[in-house]
Image (cartoon, grey):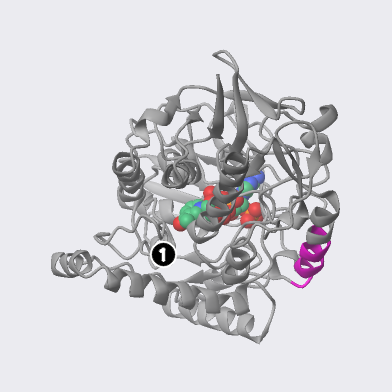
Amino acid sequence: MTLSVAIIGAGFAGIGAAIRLRDRGITDFEIYERDTRVGGTWRDNTYPGAACDIPSHLYSYGFAPKPDWSRTYSGSAEILDYIDEMVDTFGIGPHLRFGHTVTGISYDAQAGEWTVSFADRDPVRARSVIVASGPLANASFPDIPGIDDYRGNKIHSARWDHDYDFAGKRVAVVGTGASGVQIIPELVKVAESVKVFQRTPGWVLPRVNGHTSGAVRKMFSDVPLLPKLIRSAWYWGHESMAVGLVWDTPFTRLVEAVSALNLRLQVADPWLRRQLTPDFSAGCKRLLMTSDYYPALQADNCKLVTWPIARMSEHGIRTVEGIEHRFDAIVFATGFDVSKAGTPFPVTGVDGRDLASEWSGGAFAYRSVAVSGYPNLYFTFGPNSGPGHNSALVYMEAQIDYIVEAISRLQNFGWRSLEVRREAQDRFNADIQRRLRSTTWNSGCQSWYLTDDGFNATMFPGFATQYVNQLKTLDLQDFRITAARTETATATAG
Ligand code: N01
């Protein structure tokens, strides 16, 4: 049996794609998930304090509004509940196949079908494949010498050990990115002592996270227009931030000035302020949204360490000036192994071509979703689809609708394949890379957005509105269509 669609990954993107496929009457699809439950990065990131730094009315799908978010910025548990609710409400459960790790996908041009191979079950055939495995799937421990020598507890932010009791323990946190700044205030509340190992300080803006009262939630449920208006207000508020965060402009200096003022208001000690002052343009790395990080750093049981880490020892961390810091546990808030080059598993396209080799210098695609030489294959959160200033779900929703439109056309017109033309893809990428040159991400800092060679395969250089607009129309003149039998046809409809 050949499925219409195989979806790889049951995080936000995979579940969203499933909902939209069903909306279009496509029901013979399966979702393969290596874990035992849905949720992707929100299933994995359950560290204390885990929350979204985008307001929930915006960090949700437009086609699945949730009027009763309990706070402005929800915690990971409520976001995971939202994903579970979508699975129930839209009848996605029967499509889920848990515990199956995909080991490769391969295209059969003759049949116009993909074979999806697994570590633990027989392969399946599908006409189209959606790779929704997400960029933040693989937790990454840093390459610190001696990391395996350490005998205490090593805990990664994305693989939290809920059985470990931090009360009364001497704890280190390595990493002060978006995850680190959420974890540190929570650990400071319970641990005997917390030492924070900072390599690069980030720009911080306050995050006011209020509870939404029962009355307001009821009002939002009764009058659906209200949460829509709130979503719209948040959307345009974030969209305006692009002017300072995506491009280096006078507005960037304004963001930096507000952030510096926030630092001055929250941190009295000038030396600590200096240690916490970034030396790169705001926006180059992800802006940190937190109101409790600076106060936590100044708690009596917390200390910021800015000496670089030389190595790890049996008992803790040795910094370059020769001091050994001893700990009961070390928390690594050191991010993810993000595939900016290569593919999450081997992808074999037309005539045996290998996507990992083509992407070895950095990934690229057409409008971030399709790649020439790999017909009927689509990526969510593919190359150059990342937002620096707005909700990832706005981008994801646009990708999903575009992909589902392409798959519906394939089904409805009985095409064998739909493959983006190389020249359209090259044109698109030349433009993307040209536009990236003037963005803050390429302005000189180190981040997970860039390859070691400085190639940006991750971010979209523009407003969310531009990203969404380019995915509103499936421009078929940019695709090669192969009819069900053997002849090749070029459609002109847009
Ligand atoms: O990871 P990161 P993250 N020695 O890669 C440090 C999303 N997210 O998990 O800056 C010492 O940003 C590293 O230092 P430096 C969001 O997309 C979203 O925090 O490289 N330190 C940095 O401080 C985000 O971008 C939410 O110098 C080392 C930290 O570890 C993405 O997840 C919440 C080191 C890694 O920061 C990743 O964020 C949380 C070493 N050897 C996360 N190696 C939302 O709210 C690394 N570091 C939506």
Looking at the picture, which amino acid does disc 1 mark? Leu
The answer to whether any part of residue 369 appears in the image is yes
Prevailing secondary structure of the magenta residues: helix
Q: Tell me the residue at 42%/29% (across/down).
A: 96
Is 306 magenta? The answer is: no
Which region of the structure is painted magenta?
429-438
Q: Residue 389: where, in percent of width, then height? A: 55, 68
Alpha-carbon neighbours of circle 1 within 10 Å: few (<14), some, or many (≥20)? many
Label 1 CB-ligand 1 distance < 8 A: no
Q: Tell me the residue at 34%/34% (across/down).
A: 162
Q: Tell me the residue at 55%/72% (across/down).
A: 271
**314 or 119, nearer to the observer:** 119
**134 or 347, nearer to the observer:** 347
Relative to 401, residue 55 above or below: below
Quadrant where the N terminus sits is top right
**203 or 244, nearer to the observer:** 244
Residue of label 1: 58
Q: Residue 307: where, in percent of width, then height? A: 63, 54
Quadrant in which residue 371 is drawn:
top right
Relative to 11, residue 421 above or below: below
The answer to whether any part of residue 335 appears in the image is no
Q: Is residue 408 left or right of residue 289?
A: right
Q: Residue 225: where, in percent of width, then height? A: 29, 72
Q: Residue 408: where, in percent of width, then height? A: 56, 45
Quadrant in which residue 85 is drawn:
top left
Relative to 401, residue 298 above or below: below
